[in-house]
Amino acid sequence: MSTPDVTVTVIVHNDAERLPRAVESVRRQTHANLEIIISDDHSTDATPAVAQRLAAEDPRIRHLRLERNSGGCSVPRNRALQIARAPFLMFLDSDDELPDNAVELLLAAHREREIDFAMGAVQRVRVDNGRRSTWMPHLVAERRALDGIEADPRLLFEHLATSKMYARAFLDRHDLRFPEGIHYEDQLFSAQAYCLAKSFTIIPEPVYRWYVAPFAASETASISNQRHKLANVRDRIHVQHLIDAFLAESGHESLREDKDHKFLKHDFRMYAGDLPYRDDVWLASFADLVTPYLDTLTPGAFARLPRAERVVIQLIRDRRLPEARLAARGLGHGVAPRRVTADAEGRTYWGDRVPKSEWSRRELDISDLELETRPFPSAQFRHEIKEITRGPGASIDLTIRTYDPALRLPVGPQRATLLIAPGGHRLHVHFRLSPVRPGIFEGHAHLDLGTVRLPLQGFAGIRHPLLRLRHQGLSHTGLLLAPLVFPTLTTRVPSHHLTVEPEGHGPGRLQVRWEPVGVTAKLIRPTVRRVAGPRAKSAARLVASALK
């Protein structure tokens, strides 16, 4: 057999259903001189039979089955490396795909100049809603050649091993293999590859299609989506220690702050967003695991974070765990704390006390948020639903509390409005917020979802109500937080099944879901989709242009 140009290893474990899709994406590559190694981590379902069938259909496919299950990605990749025949190597997971020209594009980068690896953009596809986005788009926005990771340490954020094509000689020269027996092996492998590579090329074209199931059941969730397991936290921290040791031993200690910033901004941030949903026992164990590692990080890494993220981290380190859970709600959405405290010098701190240590005061000092002086449209408030009561039909009654820690609102009742807009038609629900005590207002709103105007073709999707305040001719629209747990409400509205439920992730908003039923679902929506296809839209644009 002639030597293939590229070996693509497809690792799989008990994924017989999706394996053919992954393999087919390699078979239809525009560069055909390649070999495909299906590396089966001792599957116990129909995967072996599927792999054998695929190998029988295409002589480029080889089936490698491990004698026992390794429980991770490293062993099946390393075993495939032992038998790979090509001078260039790529890796693919069985639940993902390669775009049709991925191999051609990355191989061309290798042939343009001698490099250790080439990397391209990763296209993320949400399996729950089909939305597509680019992973770390700012890092792959343009074509560029780099002579070492020091040229752009931000690349440490792009730690996927699957978005790259490696020169076999580079991996062998440094005996670079995937670390076995641990999870998050990509992070260590990629950090080592970045540091050891003398030169590599980045291309902006998509070279990997990553299917993401963020809300998969725990038994089928990917490793990165098993953050509810404390073992997951241990694994992630263990890998960070290994990366730190490698940076020190390899003479790349200058990258430590960048790597620490990446851990805080990416790894820790993923857990921070989940904190509102964790109980007290889990939170205490999490703090026990993560605090010793946080204590080893460089001060500059913390200083590069947004203030809201620094607050959550410090509350964890100070063992103010219920407050950390509270601060984590609305991260990235400008949600205010319930209370702030000022010291004798006028500095403002998160919560109901002035922190004791100098470090804590620095991290919990939120004076830079300018809560008292920022323009009203960007002011920070905290709106929380305290009680939800089901009303007649499709209506619900809400008790809403607004926290105004900087005392931006005038004394006395405030006019407020709930907003929700499915299908482009906005429903306004006006109500009054009355003062409870300084900085706290409370009111009651009757939200009748049966009065929402829906499009003729119906509406299939989710919306979350917002809360709008007005002051001196200016308006402020902010998130409305809901109880994290409350009974799901279901009912029928014209041509739709309606569900009101907890969001279940993220900040935890009130989630309203519409699902078309009956004639709307079976006839009207499909017809409108056909009529509103690309050709119809193009014709409409031409007509509109001619009438100008």
Image: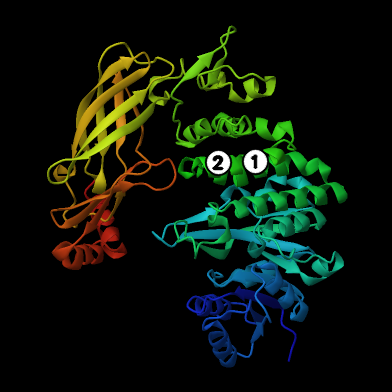
When asked about the image quadrant of residue 9, the answer is: bottom right
- Residue type of the residue flagged with mark 2: Leu
Give the total of numbered labels: 2
How packed mark 1 is, by other alpha carbons closer than 10 Å (few <14, some 14-19, many 20 or more), is some
Q: Does 301 sit left or right of 222 as displayed?
A: right
**Left or right: 139, with 469 as reference point:** right
**Picture coordinates of residue 154 (x, y %)?**
68, 45
Is any atom of residue 467 visible in this view?
A: yes
| Quadrant the N terminus occupies | bottom right
Judge by depth and name the residue closer to the eye, 61 or 319.
319
Number of the label disc, if any, that sits on residue 288: 1
Q: Position of residue 175 (x, y in %)?
A: 84, 67
- One can see residue 141 in this view: no
Location of residue 40 in the rendering, given as x and y in whole percent from the top left corner? 62, 79
Residue 534 vertical placement versus 266 (above, below): below
| Local SS, label 2 | helix
Q: Which mark is residue 283?
A: 2
Q: Is residue 400 above or below residue 365?
A: below
Estimate how packed mark 2 is, as few (under 14), some (14 to 19) or many (20 or more) residues with alpha carbons within 10 Å.
many
Label 1 element class: helix
Q: Residue furthest front?
A: 281
> Residue at point 26% right, 56% down?
460
Q: Amino acid at mark 1?
A: Asp
